Amino acid sequence: MQRIRKWKNILIGTVGVLLVGCASANNQSDPGPESTTTLDSISFGVGPYFPTPNENRQQFEPFFDALAAELDLPGDVTVTEDWIGISEALRSGTLDLAWLGPWGYVLAHHNDPSLEAIATVKYQDEPVYYSVLIARADAPFDTLEEAIALSQQGEKLKLSLADVGSTSGWLIPQAEFKRRNLNPETVFDYSEGASHAAQVIGVSTGQIDIASDYNRNLDVMIAEGRIQADEIKIIWQSEPLPNDPIVVRGNFPEAYKKQLQQKLVNLTPAEAAALLPENYTGFVASDGSNYQPIEAAGLALEVLK
């Protein structure tokens, strides 16, 4: 698809812009800060999981503060407004540790294998989640197959996918359309780039017919009263996807890495309830291998080479 090829170039370009001066002329990845056995402070980062940066900070800062306290180090938290930026900040060594989306991790690790996933978050006690396509409850179709047929037969339905750096909002839906040998840009009145919150609101208000999202975000939007559960319906759901990884930069001190991984996997239910956003219940250990399905989707779309 032309747009997939375009976004492949944009992703590569983003890496180049953000890391200009950091990569060598032969295009090798920058190894990051020189390895040391101790740190004077620790820098954390998180992407746009909640509708506003302030809300993101409020939701995640207690967790990162607890990790800094575990290491007895001062810490600071960076909140980004896009999924690519947080990955590139980790690659460049601006951040020591980040809570990444699965696709953001795969993209960053593909370009810099020194990045290490140390844990995968559990949502409602499961280390997986789902990409979904949603529509208004009163839409004249109940499945993706019906929506495709309707859009092909008459006026094109409006389909919106999320930020190109989003696993559930862009990568996985694009991979599903490719599996069906369909170009969403020709089948639908297509757009992309919106936040997940905007996706859901766009469907509930009738601005768009179909939008990508993920089950965790839908739960948040309903719990906060931004939409009513009976306003929307899910017309397609992915296979289980690995939840978000906690990732450390290259050359992150080994002792600190092990200490943090132990803290994460041994988080008690009470600690998880106090430190994590609602419905996040702890972590399982990861070495990154559980993100292979995400990598496979990137390879299928030829975004990864």
Image (cartoon, rainbow, N blue to C red):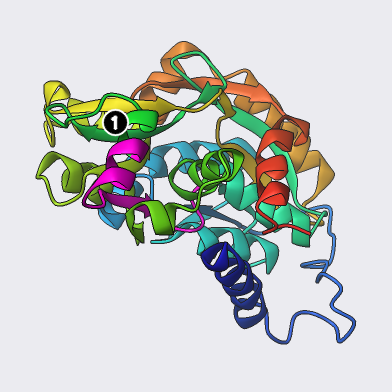
Provide residue 34's location: percent of width, then percent of height: 83, 67
Q: Residue at x 13, y 21 (%)?
A: 230
- For label 1, the SS is helix
The residue at the point 11 percent across, 31 percent down is 225
The quarter of the displayed image where residue 303 is located: bottom right
Q: Position of residue 61 (x, y in %)?
A: 40, 44
For the question of whether residue 265 can be seen, the reply is yes
In the rendered view, does 42 fall on the left or right side of 280?
right
In the foreground, 194 or 50: 194
Magenta segment:
148-166
Q: Is residue 67 above or below residue 8?
A: above
Relative image position of residue 300 (x, y in whole percent) = 70, 47
Residue at the extreme right of the image, as rendered:
26
Question: Is residue 86 shown left or right of residue 294?
Answer: left
Identify residue for label 1. Answer: 218
- Asked if residue 1 lies in the magenta stretch, the reply is no
Q: Name which residue lies at 43% across and 52% down.
A: 184
The reply to whether residue 219 is visible in this rendering is: no
What amino acid type should be assigned to the residue bearing mark 1? Leu
